[in-house]
Image: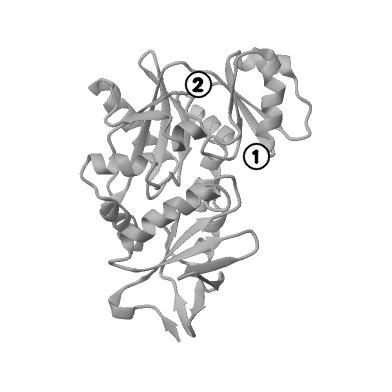
């Protein structure tokens, strides 16, 4: 018999890990979520690997039946009522796990599989946004094993430019290119992380990010965060090794603030997002350009969304419980 409601508490699965370069960040996020929802719910950490899912509990591992979304723990079958997905790369943020839960009718914390797949593909997402009159950097897509025309790239994007894995996050494999000679090695490096590489024109301006959520069926944009990196750009070290200053609220005027919050909510609606999303911008001469849409932003202690939430009086506990309660409805 399934155990679904011990002491009226629902069983919440926190899915973490995955098999991308962002695995360790995902595991950090999961620990923060686990700590903050355990008072209200029975919370279980599920480690997702390429071949199996396992509940990690008190140093032991228990296999998860993905089709029923259950696990046998100490001779008791636990059926999970909700999936809190904190996998920041594949197979969470790219829509593979959301698709599974859609098929077995399990509520989950993030955007649906279609929206996740689109936003995870930087080139396709930005192309879609441009068609709907949002400003994005010029870009070109290169697929692995295809010929690389360096001159064509330079003509289209100019130099300096950015080279990025097309599907990925946390700035793994990203390079800022300052001359023609750096371009090919940067493309080769990006291909270590993905089979597609996007090359984008460099936008010089103020880096801003905006978090959006749909709690209680109302769209809400958090205060903006301004990112000032000690490095050439907001790379992994800047994000996670303290080599950046993240200023909330951002040091931009009220008009720009409202414009970016409005754009962020419009993008959220256009892409049919769900839960918490974060949309990154560069402001160039008071004109916001969309850089990236994140459907499963980091939730670790170093991450931006928790800091945004705390700036408006949302404790982490309240933030995570709101995510669960909204999606359980």
User: SS of the residue at dot 2?
Assistant: loop
Query: In the visual, does 184 lie left or right of 199?
Result: right
- In this rendering, the answer to whether 169 lies above or below 30 is above
Q: Nearer the viewer, residue 181 or 144?
A: 181
Q: In which quarter of the image is residue 193?
A: top right
Question: In the image shown, does 232 or 204 lie closer to the viewer?
Answer: 232
Q: Distance between the residues labelled 1 and 2?
A: 21 Å
Name the quarter where the C terminus is drawn: bottom left
Is residue 249 rendered to the left or right of residue 35? Answer: left
Q: Where is residue 13 in the image (x, y as percent from the top left)?
A: 44, 65
The one of 161 and 240 positioned closer to us in this rendering: 240
Is residue 243 visible to us here? yes
Label 2 Cα neighbours within 10 Å, binned few <14 / some 14-19 / many ≥20: few
In the rendered image, residue 51, in percent from the top left (x then y), is placed at: 65, 63
Element type at marker 1? Answer: loop
The one nearer the camera, 205 or 179, is: 179
Depth check, mark 1 against mark 2: the one in front is: 2
Check the picture and name the quadrant holding the N terminus. Answer: bottom left
Q: Determine the residue positioned at 53% across, 53% down.
A: 92
Kindly identify which residue carries mark 1: 193
| Mark positioned earlier in the residue sequence (1 or 2) | 1
Q: Looking at the image, which residue sits at the far left?
A: 313
Left or right for 30, reference 19: left
On screen, residue 153 above or below 104: above
User: In the rendered image, which residue does mark 2 sit on?
Assistant: 232
Do we see residue 329 in this rendering?
A: no
Q: How crowded is mark 1: few (under 14 residues within 10 Å), some or many (20 or more)?
A: many
Percent from the top left, x then y, of residue 300?
40, 47
Q: Where is residue 180 in the image (x, y as percent from the top left)?
A: 68, 14
């Amino acid at each position: 018999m399934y155990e679904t409601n011990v002491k009226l508490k629902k069983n919440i699965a926190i899915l973490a890990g995955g098999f991308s370069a962002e695995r360790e960040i995902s595991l950090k996020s999961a620990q923060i979520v686990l700590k903050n929802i355990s008072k209200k719910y029975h919370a279980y950490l599920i480690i997702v690997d390429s071949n199996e899912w396992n509940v990690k509990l008190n140093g032991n591992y228990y296999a998860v039946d993905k089709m029923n979304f259950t696990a046998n723990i100490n001779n008791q079958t636990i059926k999970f009522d909700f999936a809190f997905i904190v996998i920041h790369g594949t197979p969470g943020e790219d829509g593979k796990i959301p698709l599974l839960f859609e098929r077995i009718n399990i509520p989950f914390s993030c955007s649906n599989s279609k929206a996740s797949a689109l936003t995870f593909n930087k080139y396709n997402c930005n192309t879609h946004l441009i068609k709907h009159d949002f400003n994005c950097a010029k870009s070109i897509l290169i697929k692995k094993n295809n010929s690389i025309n360096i001159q064509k790239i330079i003509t289209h994007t100019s130099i300096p430019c950015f080279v990025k894995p097309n599907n990925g996050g946390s700035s793994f494999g990203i390079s800022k290119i300052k001359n023609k000679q750096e371009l090919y090695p940067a493309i080769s490096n990006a291909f270590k992380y993905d089979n597609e590489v996007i090359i984008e024109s460099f936008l010089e301006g103020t880096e801003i990010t905006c978090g959006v959520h749909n709690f209680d069926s109302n769209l809400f944009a958090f205060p903006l965060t301004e990112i000032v990196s000690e490095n050439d750009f907001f790379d992994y070290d800047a994000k996670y090794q303290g080599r950046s200053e993240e200023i909330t609220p951002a040091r931009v005027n009220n008009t720009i603030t409202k414009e970016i919050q409005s754009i962020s909510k419009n993008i959220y609606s256009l892409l049919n997002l769900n839960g918490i999303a974060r949309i990154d911008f560069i402001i160039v001469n008071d004109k916001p350009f969309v850089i990236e849409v994140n459907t499963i932003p980091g939730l670790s202690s170093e991450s931006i969304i928790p800091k945004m939430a705390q700036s408006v009086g949302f404790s982490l506990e309240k933030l995570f419980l709101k995510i669960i309660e909204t999606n359980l409805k």
